[in-house]
Amino acid sequence: MPNDTPQTRGPFVIEANDLTKIYGSGETSVEALSHVTVAVERGKIIAVMGPSGSGKSTLLSLLGGLERPTGGQVLLEGVDLASLNDTDRTVMRRRSLGFVFQAFNLISVLTAIENVALPLELDGISSSLAKQRATIALEQVGLQHRKDHFPAMMSGGEQQRVAIARALVIEPALILADEPTGNLDSSSGKKILQLLRSLVSERGETIVMVTHDAEIGRQADRVIRMCDGKLVEVGSGPHKTDLANARRSAAGTGDTSDPDSPEAHPQ
Amino acid sequence: MSTWAIPRREILRHPGRTLLTWLSVVIGVTSVMAVGLSTRSARQAYTNMYETITGRAALEIVGAGGTKLDAALRDVVSQQPGVQAAVPVIQRNVVMYAEKGRAKLIALGIDTALDAAVRDYELVSGEPLSPRSGLLLDASLAESLEIKVGDRIKLLVRRGLVESTVKGLVRPRSGAGVAGGGTVLIPLAVAQSYFGAPKQLDRIQMILTEDADPRSVRLALEKSLPTGAEVREPATRGSLAQETMRGLENGLLLSTAFSLLAAIFIITNTFSMSVGQRRHELAVMRAVGATQSQIRQMILREAFLLGAAGTAAGVACGLVCANLLNNMIGNLLQTDLPTVQLRLLPVASAIAFGFGASLLSAWLPASRAARLDPVEGMSGSQRSDIEALPWQMVAAGFAGTLISIGMFIATLLGIFTFEYGVAALVLLLISAVLLLPLTLKPLTWLGEWCLRRLNPVESRMARRQLLRHGGRTMLTLGVLFIAVATGLGQASSLMDNVADIRHWYQTAIVGDFFVRATMPDMETGLSAAVPETVGEEIENIPGVLKIASLRFLAIEVNGQKAMLVTEDTVFAKASSPTESLLTSGPVDPSPPTVILGSVLAKRLGVQADDSVELLTRIGPQQLPVSRVQNDYLSGGMTVYMQRPLAERFFDVEGVDAYIVRAEHSQIADVKDALAEISLRNGMMLQSYADLTTLIEGMMSGVVGSLWALLTLALLVASFGVFNMLAMNVLEQTRELGLLRAVGMTSRQVRLMVLSQAILLGIVGIIPGIVAGIAMSYLMNLATFPALGHQVEFTLSPWLVLAVAAAAFALVILASWLPASRAARIQPALSLRYE
């Protein structure tokens, strides 16, 4: 089991070092992600963009501990996800990571409040306490009045807000969102984006979001562009040198001169 | 909360699937409970009867081969050192007539002064028995027939109908005490007079002093006993009755085993489908933090809830069916068994099965669900078939086939008992299911080839769809295969067994009429005697060609309990044939021989021309066996002997029944005359037609319930096919919409789904028919150790065609709704389907 408290609390919520993912083996193997190094600072919204098959979703899965990398490591608040077994990784996920999916992915037989309370109950929190916290999370996304509705009785935008509440309820270190507006009309998409933005600005949440939408990219603190499984560009936001410096300061060396550090270079 | 809420809501969300699983549990639990309770009840009834009769006796003296004991022997025995009390008893079956009805009873002639030492009765009302008159009646029986103290009742005994006064009502302090309808206690001297046995006893029961060693007392007694008398520990269970029940129990065991197997397959199938259907949601749960163990527990909780609901209904149904079966067993044993009592072990076994089978069947799907990769599960692409059967199962199928064949051969050779034969058949079926994947590709290809001329595109796509979901297809095929194989196998074997029984009574019983008081008790051979004068009266009826008398006696052959059936020609006109009216063959009084029932011959390992040792009143006697006869009387544990010969060896007195053959032209007149005699003497008259109706009636109960089982099995299988096709259509919504968009008509879509059903039918039903025929043959073979002869295997083409047609019809019917749904899919909507 991972420790309940992070081993270190540096400027980065999550760091991916030299991350590689290969599917299959032999001649049929496909390298979905190739030597990617990236770090995510607290309280920022990061957009991951790129064409289909560029490795965006694979990166998100590896950052979320949904899959094990073929090579490299993922440090979530100092804990290497790749070194954990399935159960420990799952527990880490439900305590520290919130997911928001394009297809909402709510459990159809559970009501809104039950869907939101689910990760807490899975973690052994009592049903009544879980529901109290779920109610608060639903209030934050403006859906308290829909708490007893099943997913099929709600609009797409509402379902996505329930999914966001489910991600929020665990007070996650990081929210991973995979095309959260992809299945919504433009009006609902805007509202969801505003909600995510407000979570970052008002609550200090950290969000990594995969998207095709250039508008979302413009609103992000930083944009990571990917192509063919590689990081090709790190856009606005912390400069690569800033990033390296921050890592050094976290390590306590104080040395800020390392312009050729490979970490922030797109591979 | 959610961990219970999800299983509960999933159950309610899919009523069809839930019903199918629930029904499987119900059928299994019902079978286990009904068979367990009814057979235990019958066994317990016989044990109780023995306890009532033997009471607290430590030893008893009886006459070998039904020999009566001299009453003076009691005084000798009571003088023996170590014997505290020697209690004389005479025991017969009688028929009692009261105002409210007739009942078959065990009459115990007892010494009123001594009997309390052995039997512990409580006098509920009235007064104790006096030595010279009256009788004591079992209180519960008296209550059911509304008999009160002081009432006069009639008893049919050897002297004819006698009247007596009920002095008191008793209830045994220990044990149920009543079997075969109840007990009546009569003073010893009165009983000796009623039963034509003056100064004679059937047994002397002994209570020993506290310091006595039963073995030394027994040895000492053996030295002082006359020939033909033996000292033994009282029998406490009815071994002969249990032998009689064994055949029926084996049949029920086989049916239960098959229904359990079908239940487990169906539950596994539905849970696998359920997991497949919920793949996406399960993956989401894994993503948001559910561990593998939590997912497994969630599926198992669903199985637990369904198991609980199925078990509750199954226990209730089981209780009802147990009473029906109890009546059937009572008919078979020719006795009124007490009502089925709820007993812990059968109920606990049924409950354990209900929960155990549900959880066990759901374990594999639950484990697969737990291992589901969250990313793959949510992506909808690169779908590995989590319902698939791993290749190890095919290997297990080969291993299981070899093991089951070995077990079956060992059973046939007598190395293993019949239960192992049943287990071998069940294992063989499971193995066949595991090997079905090998037939999937070639048989679906064959099916596609057949359908290609009619609908080339639809049949090709239908086959691809089945192969794409190999695991799900295999599980559905497994259910269809098991239903067809067990249904056809049991039905065919049942028809062969019915034909065998029919052949037996048609050839073995050739009389036109039967006059009797009661059928003999299967355990003791005792029956209520026919009054002595009846034989003469029948002889004087014009039109009677031949009369044979029957007498039954419990004896020992080569140390094995058996029923001696003696036949004697009382009267025969010169023109009458000299053949036996009971055994198929001529009467052959010399040299002295016996005919053995097939089951007894098999148990003893004896064939025609061998010799057997009979324990007689003049000591052990070797007699040659003239032939072995297929027999269902007394479970085939019979020895047939002509009466003059039997009288040399055994104490054969009185008559239990008469068989009468009449002139064909005067049958109606003879029947009227016999009816008058029977009515006057309180006896039963049965014509050959009555008897065959009785036997057919007894068989029809079993046959009817097994046909119902077959129908149910096919219905349940069609539910499975419906479920699978419905899921396939749901998953193909996008593909079907695409096909509609590129020009496939709704009729073609419907045809494609129907083609899937037809292919499923071909792959499931054809091997099922082959396996069913093999099962039937093997089941008939397996009857050899139990019946002593092999029931002839006859393949009925009509039965095969009927089962195949019914199965195909149900499969097509089950596919109709999913096919209609598929045909209604709107291209535009389905292309947006998630």
Image: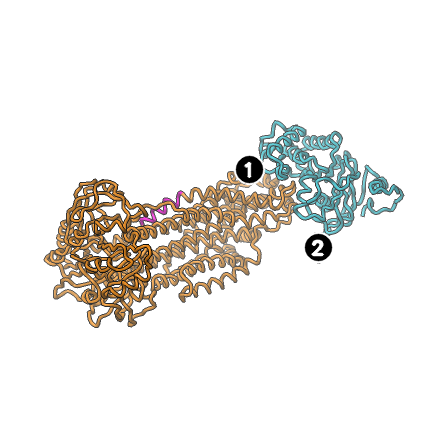
Chain colours: A cyan, B orange
Name the foreground residue: B194 vs B85: B85
Q: Are marks 2 and 1 on the same chain?
A: no
Cβ atoms under marks 2 and 1 closer than 8 Å:
no
Q: Quadrant of the N terminus of chain B?
A: top right
Q: Give the residue drawn at x 40%, y 65%.
A: B412
Name the foreground residue: B518 vs A238: B518
Q: Give the residue drawn at x 88%, y 42%.
A: A255
Residue B5 — which label?
1
Q: Secondary structure at mark 1?
A: helix
- Label 2 sits on residue: A29
Residue B156 — which label?
none
Q: Secondary structure at mark 2?
A: loop
Residue B200 position, x and y percent, is 18, 58
Label 2: how many Cα within 10 Å (few below 14, some 14–19, many 20+): few
Amino acid type, residue under disc 1 in the picture? Ala
Name the foreground residue: A149 vs A103: A149
Magenta residues span B316-327
Residue B326 painted magenta = yes
Task: Please tell me whether residue B24 is drawn above or below residue B653 in the rendered image.
Answer: above
Residue B233 position, x and y percent, is 31, 58
